[in-house]
Image (spheres, grey):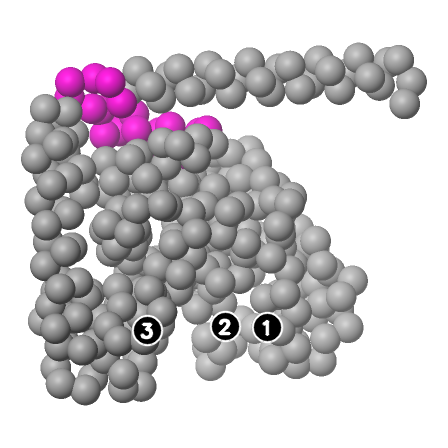
Amino acid sequence: MNTDERNFRSSYYEKCLINSVEEKKSLNKLLQDDVRNLNKLKQFCMNYTVPNIHRSYLWALVMGIQPLHKASTAYIRDQRREMYEDLLRAVTVLRCADQKEKELVMHTMWLLESNRLWHGNAGASLQADDTHFIEIVRTLLPIFNDDVETYWIAKGFYKYTRELKKECGKLKEQTQIMLKREDQSLFNHLEELGLFDGNSTLLDNWYITCFAGVICETVLVKIWDKVCGGSRKIVVFLFVELVKDIKSLLLKQKSLTDVKRLIETVKDIDGVIVNKAIKSLQNNSSEVEYTH
């Protein structure tokens, strides 16, 4: 590495560090206000990377799980914890929590809270919406240390996915327009395989769950930051960047089953695809929308 390159890299990393410090100061100020400003909190989620240490609290504020009035925080947090413990105790007494993974226990608690739990149905065949909730919990469990926070945030994020479900038709149309503009040959191949046909639910499932179980959760939360900030279209940018990144492999696939299998092995552990998607969203400011 020559001297100029070292100087450039040093300057770049220093700039990133300075920006990160300033962003954290800005967020700390927003969180310390006696009455937190919801719009500014959403804008922070949209414009910056949320620090891991603040993610659960920031999301909880944006989702309405925690109050914007700082003085009420402790009381509401205690109420949320008591409700969680009551639900967990109930499903334990009903023997619905025996020898189950934690995400399945939380799913049963969610069914009980929603008045949809009856004898025997917790272990019955899962509906699509149930699977969506379980995938969300499974994604969040390695991210947050507190099970109470995880449960409440999973419920809040699940509500966002219902909005995505309603918008799936439009999002798929936008996907076709964007991919055709970005890479015509890749679009043609996926279209020939039937990805955009009305009978295919592959894109729907990825979009509705915001790629839970597809992208590595430690980097996927950066995408979910944008969803919490109000963007639905981030899932379109993520898909387009993902398929562009593995274009050479996708062009060899002969069926949608092969496409599904390939895409769900990508994971993007180093976050390159996720970062490109976020940058693309922010560079296309006309595409950004605030919806909740």
The part of the chain drawn in magenta is 31-48
Percent position of residue 289, x then y: 37, 40
Q: Are marks 2 and 1 in contact (CB under 8 Å)?
A: yes
- Residue at 70% x, 63% y is 186
Examine the structure image and report whether residue 54 is included in the region drawn in magenta: no
Tell which circle, 3 or 1, labels the residue nearer the N-terminal end: 3
- Residue at 42% x, 57% y is 139
Q: Nearer the viewer, residue 122 or 135?
A: 122
Quarter-of-image position of residue 3: top right
* Tag 3 residue: 100
Quarter of the picture holding the C terminus: top left
- Residue at 27% x, 83% y is 123
Q: Callout 1: helix, strand or loop?
A: helix
The amino acid sitting under disc 3 is Lys
The amino acid sitting under disc 2 is Leu
**Along the horizontal axis of the image, is 145 left or right of 220?**
left
Q: Callout 2: helix, strand or loop?
A: helix
The amino acid sitting under disc 1 is Lys
Vertical order, 203 against 177 (above or below)? below
* Tag 1 residue: 260
Tell which circle, 2 or 3, labels the residue nearer the N-terminal end: 3
Tell which circle, 2 or 1, labels the residue nearer the N-terminal end: 2
Crowding near pointer 1: few (<14 within 10 Å), some, many (20+)?
Answer: some
* Tag 2 residue: 202
